[in-house]
Amino acid sequence: MSACGAFDWSTGGPGEALALGDSLEAQADADDLEELIPMPTTNQAPVPPEPFAQHPRLAELVSALGFRRYPLFLAGLLYEAPSGPLSRATAVASRDGDLLAYDSGEVFEHAGRVPASRLFEDDDLAERSLVEALADLNQAFFAHEVAGWTKGRRSVNEVGIELLRHWFLPHESVPLAITGSEVLGVVPLEVTDALLDAFRRLAGRHERGHMVEHVMELLAAG
């Protein structure tokens, strides 16, 4: 049997062939028209990036500790910059992992301390045991780092407000060493008049207005 004979003609006939020819001709006319009249282009404004760098591990720790009811936190970050020593930074972050502010850090001298976030890598811990272990390490963070920051004279909120005043930075300023750092622990900040006043003052700087608006939306949702 020839190749022509092997072809199955049952799926079409002369009418379908004519329709196919008309379709191809119409497509050719459409292509010619498109060349003569170019399609309009839409000049959409670029979508602005997130105002703050994201720290997913910090958000994971907040959720695991059952702290989602608090919108803002003071956190301790353990990181190692390229060719640098192991260092600890103090940060203000949201429950969703927005890094609002962090300081320049200092050398971390507590050898043997395990960051709370490191426990997420331990596959042998059951969920209940993980939560208990996270709570223990977070309590150690409060006893060591937070006690050192407050020195018995300042509140946690005062430490956070001072950070916001001096280190309220947009996302492009945050290096990967910080966003990928381990989290020693977190402690909630209270939404007080003093904290809100600090954000109002930050909003007065024209380049920070959209950042403060993002935080205010978070506080209103909380």
Image: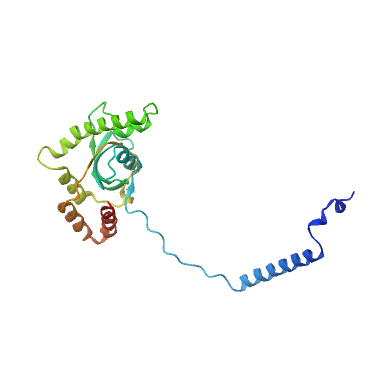
Q: Which residue is drawn at 27% across and 58% down?
A: 213
Q: Which residue is drawn at 29% across and 45% down?
A: 95
Q: Where is residue 58 in the image (x, y as percent from the top left)?
A: 31, 41
Q: In this view, does 153 lie to the left or right of 163?
A: left
Q: Which residue is drawn at 18% across and 54% down?
A: 198
Reply above or below: 148 against 6. Answer: above
Q: Position of residue 171 (x, y in %)?
A: 32, 50
Q: How many labels does the image show?
A: 0
The answer to whether residue 104 is seen in the rendering is no
Instruction: Give the residue furthest to the left.
Output: 153
Q: Where is residue 41 in the image (x, y as percent from the top left)?
A: 51, 68
Reply above or below: 183 against 27. Answer: above
Q: In this view, does 188 lie to the left or right of 119?
A: left
**Which of the 4 image quarters holds residue 4?**
bottom right
Q: Is residue 77 left or right of residue 29?
A: left
Q: Where is residue 155 in the image (x, y as percent from the top left)?
A: 14, 43
Q: Which colour scheme is used?
A: rainbow
**Which of the 4 image quarters holds residue 49?**
bottom left
Instruction: Give the residue furthest to the right.
Output: 1
Q: Which residue is drawn at 18% across and 37% down?
A: 146
